[in-house]
Image (tube, rainbow, N blue to C red):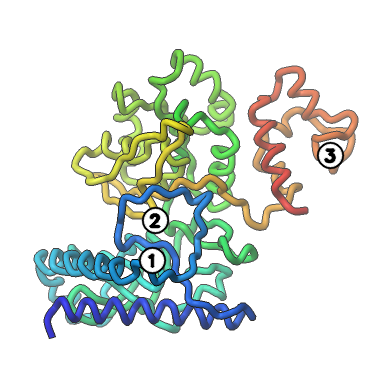
Amino acid sequence: MTDEKRVKKMLQEWAEYGQLQQVRKMKKQGKKAAAVRKRDWLPDDDEDWDDAASPAVERVVPVGEQERRKQMWDLAARRLEADAAVGPLPVDAQESSLPEGLVIEVSTGLARVEVGRRVLLCTLRGSLTASDAGFTNAVAVGDRVRVSLSGLGQGVIESIERRRSALARPDVSLAARQQVLVANADQLLAVASWAEPAFWPELVDRYLIAAQRYGLQAIICLNKVDLAPDLDKCRQTLRPYRDLGYRVIYTSTLTGLGVAELKGALAGHETVLAGLSGVGKSSLLKAIQPSLALRIAAVSGRKHEGRHTTTQATLIHLDDGIVVDTPGIREFGLSGMTPSELDAYYPDLLAAGPCRFPDCTHQHEPDCAVRLGVEQGRISAMRFDSYTKIRATLRA
């Protein structure tokens, strides 16, 4: 059997295995068992999409399926050939049944794992489950794993090392469970833009809350400041965050402003890049390290919003440090948080003083110190507006 045929057979078996696992999962939940597939990173095409509008799970559509699989096989074959050209694994890793690897991409039932200087396309051992931890996915980008080698460019993830941290969001199909987006990061870079798309304080606040909840150091990067009337306007807008102690970096890939500072902030860290599509995350990475092969798409002229160039969380090695570029997420959910717990993430609002009622919602109650502080200019109206909007989405 030729290598190409082996690759085709391998991928077809893995695809069928992933669908079988999904069917079993749905049967356990009492749902109608139907063949489903999730968006993945094979192949990495140029189709424009928006994860706020696109379903995370789609019915299998037979039209064009053969051509799609052919593209997957061809791409996988090229990747395996490239991996083989790098050379064999170190002798000690070949002799060991469980060499250590780093997960750089994850898809349904599959993961790409760096082992030494090679990248293996791996399945997951059937005994691995995320149910005990309350997650819907057992493995995530950034996980350190142990793998067994099963063939040319192939492997099986046998175990997952204990995580230092895990950034998660509610699963799109199971609201009571969470999906791990990135594992083992130590900081989160919340990237926003001044315009195209416009600065969105509520989303930035959601990122900051998520970082605090999951134990990540948060940094704010305001990009495209060359589109602002003047830099002082940007600084004035983000002053509430600086007053709270957050590091704020102002950047422009057009003028080069702040690129060196941002590069220094990422050095030596494992950083999650989070931000709305079109804010320029990929452009910033290219400015920091021009050798990176990243896709950059123009902003839509109709909506002045970004087009997704990242469709799956992807781990990227910098000269000094690691970043995980995540898809543009419009709704960064705060799973399990109650309205009363939200107050702890807005210390600037609480600094206004005690309200008349201990359980004040700061929305309509009389003698509310927070609303009075906003009216008097002692509290940022921008931050209060974000607080109000986020609070409205939380369940008591």
Residue 312, by quadrant, is bottom left
* Mark toward the start of the polypeptide (1 vs 3): 1
Q: Which residue is mark 3?
A: 360
Residue 299, by quadrant, is top left
CA neighbours of label 1 inside 10 A, class few (<14), some (14 to 19), many (20+): some
Circle nearer the viewer, 1 or 3: 1
Q: Which residue is mark 1?
A: 107
Secondary structure beneath dot 3 equals loop
* Mark toward the start of the polypeptide (2 vs 3): 2
Q: Which residue is mark 2?
A: 312
User: Between marks 1 and 3, how big is the CA–CA gap?
Assistant: 44 Å
- For the point 39% across and 53% down, the residue is 311
In the depicted structure, whether residue 267 falls above or below residue 166: above
Q: Are marks 1 and 2 in contact (CB under 8 Å)?
A: yes
Q: Amino acid at mark 2?
A: Gln
CA neighbours of label 3 inside 10 A, class few (<14), some (14 to 19), many (20+): some
- For the point 52% across and 78% down, the residue is 34
User: Between marks 1 and 2, how big is the CA–CA gap?
Assistant: 8 Å
Secondary structure beneath dot 2 equals loop
